[in-house]
Amino acid sequence: MFKVIAPDAKLLRNILAAVSTLVEEVDFNMNEEGISLKALDPSHVAMVSLTWPKQSFEKYECDKLTKVRINLSNVQKLLKKAKSDESVEINYDEDSRKLTMILKGKVTKKFIIPTLESSEEEAPSPKLTFNAKVKMLSSSLKEIIDDAEAIADNVTLEATQEKFIVNATSELSNATFEVEKGSEALLELEVKEPSKATFNLNFLAEMVKAGASASEVATLEFSTNMPIKLEFNLIQANLVYYLAPRIETT
């Protein structure tokens, strides 16, 4: 049996939108502790991880490990107008393999959704160590990435003891953004050793956009020419992206 009531339907909408930046379908794993997922994008360049503990829910009932695979775009369409003052009740019927969603606000809406065949594959947990950690306002990070996206297809992130630097370069243009210690936008800067890595902006921009819509703070961790970890602590859940670097070969 699986039945939960989430007090904020808009949060569910934002979570699904954040996951859908990388995948169209995903397996949600439910157990006694809460809901989680890990998924790789089709090219295996990026990964998304979500943990949503049972304490975040108004009601949470799950008597055994349950895996449910859904088409994200189909569910997002149903939640398009979901509001923060609406609750959402979710029930899964193993016999029919259908998910029932009931949104309660000024109007009660009930949707019954077919689920898909679960995948046998599971994304591995990345085992990484990082030399740089940057915690900043997600709105400021989004502004930087949006501006960089207008210049180039890739972006280079650099962390020194004194500042966080973002550089975007194309054949015709160059843009540099610096956030120094003491800036209101920079909440924390920890650098074991100076680090620098380049990432694809198509992926990174979508991740930042999705995370910034749900969280006020973004945490970036990276090392030279290694994958980046991009974390957003939502009010009731934790969202993490990983993205492999672009390494130029000569």
Image: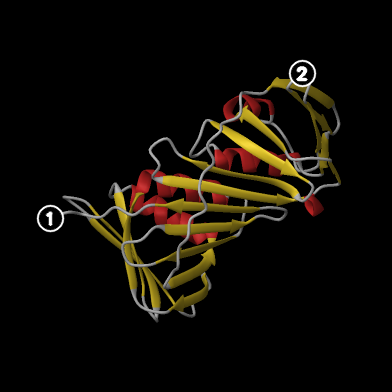
Q: How did the renderer colour the structure?
A: secondary structure
Instruction: Indicate the secondary structure of the residue bearing disc 1.
Output: loop
Q: Position of residue 231 (x, y in %)?
A: 55, 58
> Amino acid under label 1?
Thr
Above or below, comparing residue 107 to residue 169 in the picture: above
Say if residue 43 shows up in the picture. yes
Give the residue at x 77% y 51%. Answer: 33
Task: Mark 1 vs mark 2: give the one in front.
Answer: 2
Q: Nearer the viewer, residue 34 or 237?
A: 34
Q: Position of residue 118 (x, y in %)?
A: 61, 29
Local packing at callout 2 (Cα closer than 10 Å; few below 14, some 14-19, many 20+) is few
- In the rendered structure, the answer to whether residue 8 lies left or right of residue 116 reads right
Mark 1 vs 2, N-terminal side: 2
Are dots 1 and 2 in contact, CB under 8 Å? no
> Amino acid under label 2?
Ser
Give the residue at x 66% y 46%. Answer: 36
User: Within the image, what quadrant is residue 60 found in?
Assistant: top right
Above or below, comparing residue 38 to residue 103 in the picture: below
- In the rendered structure, the answer to whether residue 55 lies left or right of residue 229 reads right
Q: Nearer the viewer, residue 75 or 120?
A: 120
Q: Nearer the viewer, residue 224 or 211?
A: 224
Q: Position of residue 63 (x, y in %)?
A: 84, 40
Instruction: Indicate the secondary structure of the residue bearing disc 2.
Output: loop
Q: Which residue is mark 2?
A: 96
Q: Which residue is mark 1?
A: 250
Above or below, comparing residue 200 to residue 27 in the picture: below
Give the mark count: 2
Above or below, comparing residue 102 to residue 205 in the picture: above
Q: Quadrant of the C terminus?
A: bottom left
* Numbered label attached to residue 15: none
Give the residue at x 70% y 49%. Answer: 52
Say if residue 183 shows up in the picture. no
